[in-house]
Amino acid sequence: MKFMFVTLLLISLIMASTFVEPLNAQSGICGSKCKARCSKAGIKDRCMKYCNICCMKCKCVPSGTYGNKHECPCYRDMKNNKNKPKCP
């Protein structure tokens, strides 16, 4: 009986983990790249927020603190609800 309970528990944990997006190494990469990208921003918190959102979706961040968006077309083309660039 105990073995059956443990087995069902393990199976349910495995099943549940398939529905949760795993943390990947990309999040660490995004943090450091966005920190560099937003280092000269006037409002760093907002810059970091949107840079991390864009990085997680696009898997890249342009180099430098401004411009160079041609390096990452997804990052460049992402728009907010006012059809303005979302990514810093």
Image (cartoon, helix red, strand yellow):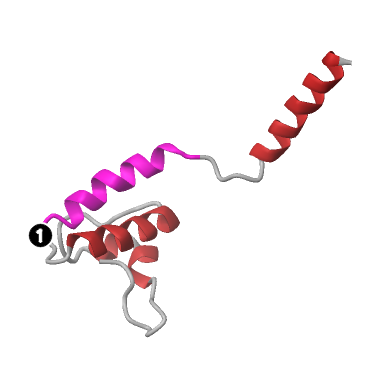
Q: Quadrant of residue 88?
A: bottom left
Of all residues, the one furthest to the front in this rendering is: 2
Residue at 17% x, 65% y is: 43
- By secondary structure, the bulk of the magenta-drawn segment is best described as helix
Q: Which residue is mark 1?
A: 40
- 36 relative to 73 in the view: left or right: left
Residue at 73% x, 25% y is: 10
Q: Please tell me how many numbered marks the rendered image carries.
A: 1
Task: Please state the extent of the stretch shown in magenta in the rendering.
Answer: 23-40
Q: Is residue 62 above or below residue 24?
A: below
Which quadrant is home to the N terminus?
A: top right
Q: Position of residue 11 (x, y in %)?
A: 77, 29
> Tag 1: residue type?
Lys
Residue at 70% x, 32% y is: 14
Task: Give whichever of 6, 32 is nearer the camera.
Answer: 6
Q: Is residue 65 above or below residue 30?
A: below
Q: Position of residue 38 (x, y in %)?
A: 18, 57
Task: Give whichever of 29, 42 is nearer the camera.
Answer: 42
Task: Give whichever of 71, 50 is nearer the camera.
Answer: 50
Of all residues, the one furthest to the bottom in this rendering is: 82
Q: Secondary structure at mark 1?
A: loop
Q: Quadrant of residue 45?
A: bottom left
Q: Is residue 83 above or below residue 60?
A: below
Residue at 34% x, 53% y is: 60
- 38 relative to 55 in the view: left or right: left
Q: Position of residue 19 (x, y in %)?
A: 65, 45
Residue 70 inside the magenta-drawn segment:
no
Q: Is residue 33 above or below residue 76?
A: above
Q: Position of residue 4 (x, y in %)?
A: 86, 19
Residue 29 inside the magenta-drawn segment:
yes
Number of other residues with Cα within 10 Å of mark 1, as a class: few under 14, some 14 to 19, many 20 or more: few
Task: Give whichever of 86, 14 is nearer the camera.
Answer: 14
